[in-house]
Amino acid sequence: MKNRRSILSIFAATLLGVVFAVGDATAQKKASEVDAVKTANQAFYTALSARDVGRMQKIWSGDADIQNIGPRSKTAEVGWAAIKQSLERTFDAFPELKVSMDEPRIKINGSTAWVSGIEKAQRKNKAGETGGGSNIGTSIFVKQGGRWLMVYHHASAVPQ
Amino acid sequence: MKNRRSILSIFAATLLGVVFAVGDATAQKKASEVDAVKTANQAFYTALSARDVGRMQKIWSGDADIQNIGPRSKTAEVGWAAIKQSLERTFDAFPELKVSMDEPRIKINGSTAWVSGIEKAQRKNKAGETGGGSNIGTSIFVKQGGRWLMVYHHASAVPQ
């Protein structure tokens, strides 16, 4: 009887250990995925601030129907060719550009992640005039081939 | 030899049939999921136009961190309590409200879907003044308990 109890106790403790270990591993995996999305999101703003179209292309998914909505867009730009053209226009108009999102809110569901937060932008145009503003930014990333890639971006000026 | 060829032919034809049938079933499942998301998205605009907070709550996920960004929002409203308050303010300000998205673009990845398109809004305020405008709308839905529920909405005025 006593032996059986001991065996049961050991079994229960082991089971509990396994449950906690699995729970811990899941929590760790989740945290590392959030970090990976955070890094991908940060890379977007770094490439934007570097005015680097090539780097930008590596951040976006190769999917045909990726979409971008900038603060001056009247409709979504669909596909890399349209997004590239829009980036080139922006980079041409602003020889200096710094955009950052200090506090991204990140949510993950399976292999899809969405990020939101305030984008702070500082710009200098060709005439040397500086400007700036805040946007509300929404991005969607999809994990493809082990990497979180951007499939959607919607930025809109914070209303006055 | 001839027999063996016949058997091989029948085998190949059967295999091809199975491949097509599976492909067809997958395509059908995909199309029906797109339809389900379209219906959920439509229900959002119907509830908005009906100024019905109760109906709206059934469209949103019960997740604690659902987010809404309206065309006049300076930051995201997080959680149902904040979203509800914002809806009540809007419904109170506009005794008449019609919002629609005629051509939603729908993408699905696993149990996450995102929708974008132009929202057309018509409003009448308490003073009886009518107004209207177009927004760019982005919504994210997550399939929970077999239903596509809204977890994120970002609407911004189409820039002039």
Image (cartoon, coloured by chain):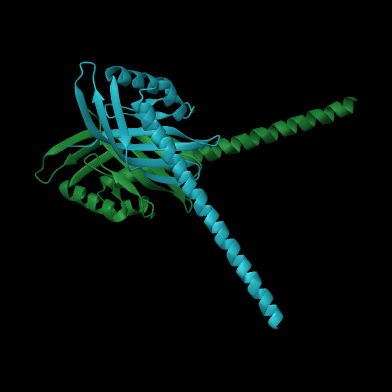
Chain colours: A cyan, B green
Name the one closer to the observer, B1 or A131.
Answer: A131
Q: Where A151 sits versus B72, above or below? A: above
**Residue A74 horizontal side relative to residue A152, left or right:** left
The N terminus of chain A lies in quadrant:
bottom right
**Residue A157 horizontal side relative to residue B64, left or right:** left
What is the total number of numbered labels drawn onto the structure image? 0
Question: In the orientation shown, which residue stands out farthest toward the bottom?
Answer: A1
Name the one closer to the observer, B44 or B10.
Answer: B44
Name the spot of residue B84 as percent of width and height, x first.
27, 53
Q: Where A3 sits versus A90, above or below? A: below
**Residue A41 horizontal side relative to residue B118, left or right:** right
Residue drawn at the location 50% of the way across and 45% of the way down: A110
Please indicate, yes or no, whether residue B113 appears anywhere in the rendered image. no
Please indicate, yes or no, whether residue B49 appears anywhere in the rendered image. yes
Name the one closer to the observer, B46 or A75.
Answer: A75
The C terminus of chain A lies in quadrant:
top left
Quadrant of the image occupied by residue B13: top right
Name the spot of residue B25 as percent of width and height, x first.
59, 38
Residue drawn at the location 19% of the way across and 21% of the way down: A129
Quadrant of the image occupied by residue A120: top left
Question: In the orientation shown, which residue stands out farthest toward the left?
Answer: B127
Residue drawn at the location 33% of the way across and 47% of the way down: B67
Name the spot of residue B2 as percent of width and height, x first.
89, 25
